[in-house]
Amino acid sequence: MEPTRVAAAGAVVHDEAGRILLVQRGRAPQAGRWTLPGGRVEDGESPARAAAREVAEETGLVVEIGREWLVLDRPGPDGVLFEIHDFVATAVGGRLRAGDDAADVGWFTRAELAGLPLTTDLLDILDRAGLLPVDPV
């Protein structure tokens, strides 16, 4: 039996200091772990538009979506296969606050990531893409 495919989208956002924006998942899968803001693509919505909407809903920030840097299949619960489209984005407005299904939200340096419970493979994926935050010198 083929898994049910669900489109999802998210974004990598860095601030002026080079830190990365992460949300703490408030729900399964991987509740309590930190990850990129994102979620399901709604009917009739492009992955890029979904990424911008999800960032706004989860973090309070308005972003401008740039290039798509990753498409990844990730198994989910109950036979679901998430097709995740991740974009690079720039914050252009809003006020940082945890919203929607995010338990918390914050900006993090590379050193701070080492102490966080992150979602599966996030650190490695960001590292391979050259998208890890820059630590201050």
Image (tube, rainbow, N blue to C red):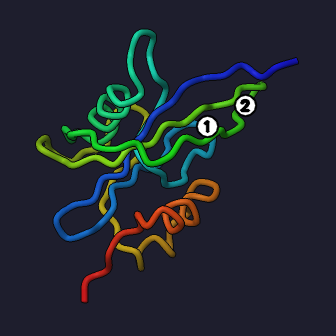
The x, y position of residue 5, in whole percent, is 66, 22
The x, y position of residue 29, in whole percent, is 63, 39
Q: How many marks?
A: 2
* Crowdedness near tag 1: few (<14), some (14–19) or many (≥20) residues, C-alpha within 10 Å: few
Q: Nearer the viewer, mark 2 or mark 1?
A: 2
Q: Could you say which quadrant of the image residue 94 lies in? A: top left
Does the residue at mark 2 contact the one at mark 1 (Cβ under 8 Å)? yes
Residue extending farthest to the bottom is 137
Q: Quadrant of the C terminus?
A: bottom left
Q: Is residue 15 left or right of residue 21?
A: left
17 versus 35 height, above or below: below
Kind of residue indicated by mark 1 = Ala
112 versus 124 height, above or below: below
Residue denoted by label 1: 28
Q: Could you say which quadrant of the image residue 82 lies in? A: top right
For image coordinates 50% across by 46% down, the residue present is: 70
Q: Which element carries disc 1, helix, strand or loop? A: loop
Q: Nearer the viewer, residue 66 or 102?
A: 66
Q: Quadrant of the N terminus?
A: top right
Q: Nearer the viewer, residue 77 or 135?
A: 135
For image coordinates 32% across by 36% down, the residue present is: 99
What is the C-alpha distance between the residues marked 2 and 1? 9 Å
Residue extending farthest to the left is 93
The x, y position of residue 7, in whole percent, is 55, 25
Residue denoted by label 2: 77
